[in-house]
Structure formats: C-alpha cells, structure tokens
C-alpha cells in the first residue's frame, strides 16, 4: 500500500521530517463487517446475482489512482450512474393491461349467487309494487278518476277552443294595438282569420268522426269493449284533470332526492373548496358513472394537491356538490397521491338500517374465520374477526354500542368451542340470556343474595390470568407435529384434553368496574395484562364504555386494544381517545356521525383499512333465539361449562397475594428481588404460582409486579454484590408489604 503523508498539528514546523516519518503510517483498507444473509427456503441468497461483484472483487477491478502505473488511466463513469428504465416484458405489459381493462359484464350477470340475489330482489320489488297498486285501484284510484274527469273534460275543451280561435296570438294583437301599429295589427288579424278557418274545419271534421265512432261503438260493439273505451276515456280525462300537487297514482316507493352528477358540478365543487387554481384544474381519468346507489367519480387533483387536502375540504366539497356531507365518501388511490376517488350516494346511506343479522339463519359459526358483522356505506358486507386482538367499543348512550358488541359475542356463542366470559357493568337486560352459554357471567356492581358480581369478575380475571400463563407454558412444550410454531391452532383449541379453547372475554360498561373503590385497581391491572398478553394464546378481550376518559377508562388499558370501534361521540377529541391519537388527521372523526346513525361506527385496527361499519341488528328476541340455538349446540358437543352448568370457580388458596408474599419473606429481609419471591411463592403454592416460576427472570418479575400494583406496591431497583460484582434487579420492600396489609385490614374493619 502507498504511504499517505500526515499533516503536522498546528504549531509544529512543517519541515521536521523526522516527526513526519514517525507519524506516517500505512493506510489499511476498511473492511465492512459481514452479516449473515437471510435464509429463504429454496433460494441461495449468498450466490451473487448476474452482473454483481462478489465480495473482494472490487479491490482488484477498480484502478488505484495513486498507483504510478495508472497514469494513463482516465476517470471512469460515476459510481452511481442514472438508472436505465427498461421496457417491461410482453407478459408484464399484458398483465398490466389486464388489470386496467374493465369487465364486459357486471358481476351480477356473471356470478350465480349475485344473479340469484338480483332475481329475488326483482321478484320481491315488483310483486310489492303490483300488490300495492292492485289494492288501491278500486278503493283510491277509481274514485279519484271519477272526481277529476269533469275537470279534465273542461280543461280539454278549453284547450281545443283556445287552439281553434288562435288564443296564443292574442298577446301580439294587443301589443300592436297598444303601439298603434295599424299595419302590424291588420297583418295579424288576417293571419288569425286564416288559422281559425283552417282549425275550425279540422275541429269539425274531427268532431264528426269522433261522434260517428262513438255511435258505432254504442250500437255494434260488445259491452266489454264499450266499457273498456269508456274506462280509457274517463281515465284520460281524470289524468288531465288531476291537480299538479296531488297525482292520480300514489308512489309505492319513496323517491329520494337524486340528480345527475356532471363534470361541471364536480369542477365547481373543487373550485369552491379551494383545490384548484386559475391555471390548474382537475382532470377526469375515467368518466363519471353510476356505482350502486350513487355516483363514482375519480379525479386527478392539480399538482401539489393531495388526498389529504381533499379530505380536509370534505365539507366544502359536499357543499359544492349540493349534497349532505354524509353522502360524500373519499377513497385514496394507491397509484398517485393526487388521485382521489369519490363516491356520492343518492341519499345518506348511514341512516339506512343494515338489516337483521345473518346469524339468525346460521346453524353454527367457525370463530377462526371472519364472520358477518355489518355492511359498509355502499352495502358491501364487512367481516369481523377477534383472533389475536382486543377490541374497544366506545360511544355516547343509545347509539347502538351494546348491540354492536353483542353481535360479536353472539357469533362466538354459535361456535361451541369458544369459551365466553360476559360481565355487564350496568346490569341491563341486554346480556342476560348469555347465562345459557357463558362460562363466567355477572351483572352490575351491587351485591345481591350473597353474590358479589365484582368479586366474581375479579375471581374470573385471576382464573383467566392463570389460564393464560399456563397456555404459554404448555404451548412451548407441545411436540412440533402438534404445535409446529408454538402457537394455538384450530385443532389444539378444539381438543378437550388440552383445554385451550378460543376465549372471548366481554366487559360492557367497563368503567363501572374500574372505578370500584376496593377492587378497581386490581381489576385494571388484570385487564391490562389480559389485553396485552392474552390474545396471542387465543384469549381475546372486548370492552365497551360510554366514558373513555382517563379517569373512567385509563389510557393504560385503552392503549392495549389493537382494534377500536367508535360510534357517535360528542367531540373529535373523544373520537381520538377511542380510535387512537392521530385518527382525526387520517379523516376518522366519529363526532360527525348523526343521531340517526344508530349502530354505525368507525372501525380501525381490525384490518389494514379503516372504514365505516353499519352493524347488523339482533334485538333482544333475536338474541334469545340465537343463544337458545347456541346452548343446544354446545350441549350436543358437550362444551357447556362454568356458570352455564352451575360449576363455581375453584376457591382461591389465598385471600390475597399480600399474605403469600408476607409468608415467604424472611424475618430479617428488608429488600428481596422479585424473581426470588416468585420462586418462593411457587414452592409455597405450586398450583397458583407454578406457572410464574417457569418464566424467564424478567417476565417473572413483571408478573409479580402486575399482581402487586393494584395494592399500591411498586418494585424498585435493589442492588446486591455477588462475586465482587454489583448486580441490580427489580424487587420489593418489606415495609411496603406491611403497609399494604395494614391498609387492607383497616378498610375491612371500617366496612
């Protein structure tokens, strides 16, 4: 390698060759640290691609400009030359054209199920219309025709008389008289006389022919034909005599305000919304056309404008199109930031009920697969899933929050291998029938007849936490041919011997339990643990609340829910609390929903796309039918358990964890590491704490910390010297345990 001269530090003479020689050194090449390539089955990623240099080859191929032998070499091309855009292959070009090509026939013509649906709709629609008018024909329409026909005859006669005597030219003749224009007046009079003579002759001939035809029909035609002509003439006169504001025939279907959408209207809307300039307007990559019960418009905004700008101008765009804001829906196009797709509904689609739940006709549900929950704004079905996630439902009262959450629980009930926990903080009748199938269930917060629902919830939470911890341990020990990835599978969840079924834990009006003066803190800690950890082993948590604020439903619980569903709320800030921070900037604002939008909400986190869901309706009677069927199904499969068959939860071995921790603490120990305490607890009560002891040191300490947190005990760093080295770990203090036990006993004595 060549030697590189070293520049002397400031203040030293440049001519000191000895010092320069001491500081000069060989320049060594800097080698990048090699990282192992990712492993992909069937692909050797270590082999270089065609035209790619192998590691080390660049050192020999690149010329060294400091080399004396490289004097005649010229500087080559830049290291990163501009990329050459190669044309796609014929196959890629054809594939792109196939994607851009519109279908020749719509889906309802090609797909058998959609053809059947259209046929059923047509039969139902037109049979209803025929029946509607058939009932009103003798009772409403015939009396109207008889009443309006004299007025129609008078209007018809008057119209013929005005035509014969040239009434339309009267205004011109009067104007000529007013202007004292004799020549013009005489010209108009001569024209009128000619018209009257011609039209009078035509009217006379027509009257003669009509009278002769009437006499002929009266004398020669059969009675049914005569009656038919009389009815036709009377109906014609009745239609002519009907008032404009009261049509002769009633409408069998309510006609909503609908207008043809044109490009001029769309351009005007963008102009008033400030999305265009004098120099740049919008472009239409596709013609405006009908799309279901509305119009589909795709526009390219001016350069510099984006989908977010259109989203912020949503209200102004709706005003420019002369429609309600609830009729305009925006979709982002993946191909360009400035391309926006609008769907303009003929009427507010969110005010239209989505209909009865399809669960009414379902014999059973596979909870491992998505199930019908509702429809979107265009009527397309929305499928829900509760696998591997927790769901938070929030709304103001009487907007369908409970019914929306109950539909998911009804789907879980129709899968006999799903274990249900149902707790209702407001003790309403909405969840009562779930007692037929629920493993654990309770209502309200007030003890009654020796039963405390809050204690029952706390016991169920502890039971479920132990089950979750046990699942993690057992899944990691199952053989690979049963559990190949250490995760729950449908086969494992339905194996009664393994006892790890899918579980849905439902708490309606969760704020009632979280604000409980005695057990609220522990309930919060346990629910946070379950919402964060339990979904990975098949235990999903669904909570609903009408008070999503930090006091009633703390953020430490809300933030653990991966999926959010917000029905109508009071403000955009509350909407952001339910849906998550930043949702408003994404265009999700549940405060814009109206009172008439019952059961309608914004769903986020259940899939990649967030959108509107109009949930299906299953009222109290429908829910009872579904749950009765679910109970029979579970009885046939022998999967009823817990409260549904009168099995009480196993009694807890200790009143509280405080007593157990106090028991395992040594007399002279003031500070003890958490993992040490857990090992001692496992020795004391293996059935209760054995699962904790199997965890790694850090999760082991976290489990103890979560259990002690509701009692006001926090873990601190405790330092110990081991083998001459200082080791810090989380631990607890004896004084904290003693203080918590004293406070608990004082509360009991005061109660």
Image (cartoon, rainbow, N blue to C red):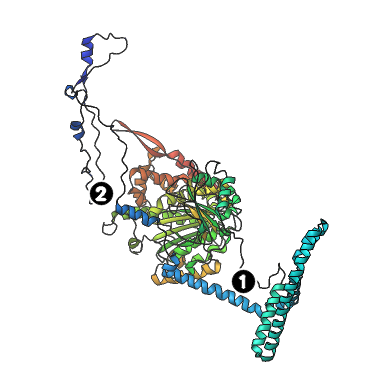
Locate residue 668 relative to residue 331 in the image: left or right.
left
How far apart marks 2 and 1 lie (CA) works out to: 64 Å
Mark 1 secondary-structure assignment: loop
Q: Quadrant of residue 139?
A: bottom right
Residue under the point 23% across and 27% down? 74
Closer-to-camera residue (205/334): 205
Characterize the local packing of mark 1: few (<14), some (14-19) or many (20 or more) Cα atoms within 10 angstroms: some
Q: Quadrant of residue 156?
A: bottom right
Q: Is residue 523 above or below residue 72?
A: below
Locate residue 316 relative to residue 422 in the image: left or right.
right
Residue under the point 48% across and 58% down? 506
Q: Report x, y in % for residue 646.
A: 46, 66
Q: Is residue 237 visible?
A: yes
Closer-to-camera residue (580/464): 580
Closer-to-camera residue (111/492): 111
Q: Report x, y in % for residue 299.
A: 50, 50
Residue under the point 66% across and 91% down? 220
Q: Is residue 734 above or below residue 97?
A: above
Q: Is residue 663 visible?
A: no
Quick one: which residue is furthest to the front in this view?
183
Q: Report x, y in % for residue 659.
A: 44, 47
Q: State the mark number for residue 553.
A: none
Closer-to-camera residue (738/725): 725
Q: State the mark number for residue 40.
A: 2
In this figure, what is the number of numbered marks? 2
Q: Nearer the viewer, mark 2 or mark 1?
A: 1
Q: Check disc 1 and report the residue beneath it.
A: 252
Image quadrant containing the N terminus: top left
């Amino acid at each position: 390698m060549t030697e590189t001269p070293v520049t002397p530090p400031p203040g030293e003479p440049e001519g000191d060759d000895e010092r320069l020689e001491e500081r000069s050194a060989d320049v060594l090449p800097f080698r990048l640290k090699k990282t192992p390539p990712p492993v992909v089955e069937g692909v050797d990623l270590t082999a270089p691609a065609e035209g790619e240099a192998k590691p080390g080859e660049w050192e020999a191929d690149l010329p060294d400009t400091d080399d004396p032998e490289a004097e005649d070499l010229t500087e080559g091309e830049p290291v990163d030359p501009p990329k050459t855009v190669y044309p796609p292959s014929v196959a890629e070009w054809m594939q792109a054209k196939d994607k851009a090509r519109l279908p020749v026939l719509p889906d309802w013509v090609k797909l058998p199920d959609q053809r059947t649906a259209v046929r059923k709709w047509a039969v139902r629609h037109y049979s209803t219309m025929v029946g509607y008018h058939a009932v009103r024909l003798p009772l409403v329409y015939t009396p109207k025709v008889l009443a309006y026909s004299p007025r129609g005859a008078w209007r018809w006669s008057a119209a013929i008389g005005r035509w014969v005597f040239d009434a339309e030219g009267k205004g011109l003749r009067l104007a000529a008289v007013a202007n004292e224009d004799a020549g013009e007046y005489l010209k108009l009079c001569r024209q009128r006389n000619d018209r009257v003579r011609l039209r009078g002759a035509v009217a006379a001939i027509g009257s003669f022919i009509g009278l002769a035809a009437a006499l002929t029909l009266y004398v020669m035609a059969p009675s049914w034909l005569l009656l038919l002509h009389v009815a036709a003439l009377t109906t014609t006169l009745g239609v002519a005599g009907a008032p404009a504001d009261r049509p002769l025939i009633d409408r069998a279907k309510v006609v909503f305000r609908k207008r043809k959408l044109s490009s001029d209207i769309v351009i005007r809307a963008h102009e008033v919304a400030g999305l265009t300039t004098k120099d740049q307007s919008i472009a239409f990559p596709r013609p405006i056309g009908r799309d279901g019960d509305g119009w589909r418009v795709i526009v390219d905004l001016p350069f510099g404008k984006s989908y977010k700008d259109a989203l912020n101008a949503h209200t102004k765009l709706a005003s420019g199109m002369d429609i309600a804001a609830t009729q305009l829906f925006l979709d982002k196009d993946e191909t360009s930031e400035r391309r926006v797709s609008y769907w303009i509904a003929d009427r507010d689609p969110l005010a239209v009920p989505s209909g009865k739940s399809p669960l009414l006709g379902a014999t059973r549900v596979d909870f491992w697969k998505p199930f019908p929950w509702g429809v979107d704004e265009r009527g397309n079905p929305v499928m829900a899933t509760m696998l591997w996630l927790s769901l938070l439902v929030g709304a103001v009262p009487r907007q369908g929050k409970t019914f929306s959450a109950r539909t998911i629980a009804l789907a879980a009930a129709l899968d006999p291998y799903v274990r249900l926990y149902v707790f209702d903080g407001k003790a309403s009748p909405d969840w009562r029938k779930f007692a037929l199938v629920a493993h654990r269930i309770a209502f309200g917060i007030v003890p009654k007849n020796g039963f405390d629902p809050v204690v029952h919830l706390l016991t169920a939470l502890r039971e479920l936490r132990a089950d979750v911890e046990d699942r993690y341990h057992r899944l990691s020990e199952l053989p690979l041919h049963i559990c190949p990835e250490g995760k729950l599978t449908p086969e494992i969840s339905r194996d009664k011997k393994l006892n790890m079924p899918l579980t849905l834990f439902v708490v309606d009006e969760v704020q009632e339990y979280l604000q409980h003066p005695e057990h609220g803190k522990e309930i919060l800690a346990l629910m946070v643990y379950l919402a964060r950890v339990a979904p990975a082993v098949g235990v999903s948590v669904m909570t609903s609340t009408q008070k999503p604020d930090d006091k009633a439903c703390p953020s430490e619980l809300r933030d653990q829910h991966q999926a959010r569903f917000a029905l109508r709320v009071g403000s955009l800030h509350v909407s952001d609390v339910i849906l998550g921070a930043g949702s408003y900037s994404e265009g999700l604002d549940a405060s814009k929903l109206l009172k008439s939008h019952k059961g309608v909400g914004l769903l986020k986190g259940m899939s990649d796309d967030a959108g509107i869901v109009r949930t299906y309706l299953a009222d109290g009677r429908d829910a009872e039918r579904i749950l009765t069927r679910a109970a029979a199904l579970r009885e046939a499969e022998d999967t009823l358990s817990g409260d549904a068959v009168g099995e009480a939860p196993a009694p807890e071995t200790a009143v509280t964890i405080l007593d157990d921790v106090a028991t395992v603490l040594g007399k002279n120990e003031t500070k003890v590491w958490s993992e040490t305490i857990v090992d001692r607890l496992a020795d004391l009560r293996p059935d209760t704490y054995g699962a904790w002891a199997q965890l790694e040191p850090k999760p082991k300490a976290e489990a103890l910390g979560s259990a002690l947190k509701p009692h006001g005990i926090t873990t601190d760093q405790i330092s110990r010297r081991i083998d001459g080295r200082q080791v810090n770990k989380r631990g607890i203090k004896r004084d904290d345990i003693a203080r918590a036990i004293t406070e608990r006993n004082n509360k009991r004595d005061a109660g």
